[in-house]
Amino acid sequence: DPHYWMDPVLAGMMVRNICTALSDADPERAKLFSARADTLCAQLQALDAEIKDTLAPLDERTLYFGGHNALYYFARRYELDIRTPYEGYSPDAEPSARSISKLMDALADAKHKVIFYEELENPRAAETIAEGAGARLLPLFSAHNVSQDDLDGGTTYFDLMRRNIASLREGLGL
């Protein structure tokens, strides 16, 4: 899974690595790069704390996700169990009827009848599972693509992650 930026702590490590590379390439602006990296890392730490605080009350830590598992690093950081009908991370993979059926059965018995889906991806599998399990659909954003409206509106990583927090709150009754 290449979506390591879904973990704000790992995203902070990325910021530091980028800062180092930029500083090496342009030593005259190293202080500027460092100051901006410090600001961004502080924002990422605050985001991490916000997500932890949001998810702290969860007693059931399973999320049902009707897309490719772009949330592995997010789930690992926040001790969530992501259930998806897809095997692996290939964007070309299709879930089997059996895996969809298994997820429908699990979701039908779940405390929170919500299946999350990845924004800007075809939610066909999530819709099928939701219909079969009597569940609602809510989006989660993997922050690797944005809509034209979001792009035009200046949407940031932090905006997308806060949309995720809002979806998690709504879907998990937080």
Image (spheres, grey):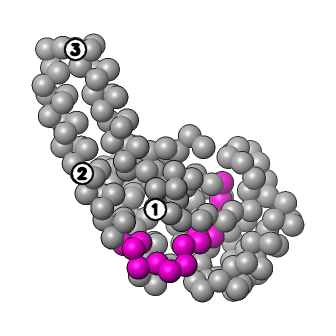
Q: Residue at x 34, y 28 (%)?
A: 17
The answer to which quarter of the image holds residue 166 is: bottom left
The answer to which quarter of the image holds residue 106 is: bottom right
* Residue labelled with disc 2: 43
Compare marks 2 and 1 and give the one earlier in the sequence: 2
**What are the residue bounds of the magenta stretch?**
54-68
Task: Determine whether label 2 and label 1 are within 8 Å by CB.
Answer: no
At label 2, the amino acid type is Gln
Q: Residue 7: x percent and y percent?
A: 43, 50
Say whether residue 145 is visible: no
Local packing at callout 3 (Cα closer than 10 Å; few below 14, some 14-19, many 20+) is: few
Local packing at callout 2 (Cα closer than 10 Å; few below 14, some 14-19, many 20+) is: some
Q: Is residue 4 left or right of residue 127?
A: left
* Residue labelled with disc 3: 26
CA–CA distance between discs 2 and 1?
Answer: 18 Å
Camera-side residue of 81 and 133: 81
How many numbered discs?
3
Label 1 vs label 3, nearer the camera: 1
Q: Residue at x 36, y 64 (%)?
A: 51
Task: Determine whether label 3 and label 2 are within 8 Å by CB.
Answer: no
At label 1, the amino acid type is Tyr
As helix, strand or loop, the secondary structure at mark 2 comes to helix
Rendered view: 164 above or below 130: above
The answer to if 131 sits in the magenta stretch is: no
Name the image quarter holding the C terminus.
bottom left
Q: Residue at x 70, y 44 (%)?
A: 90
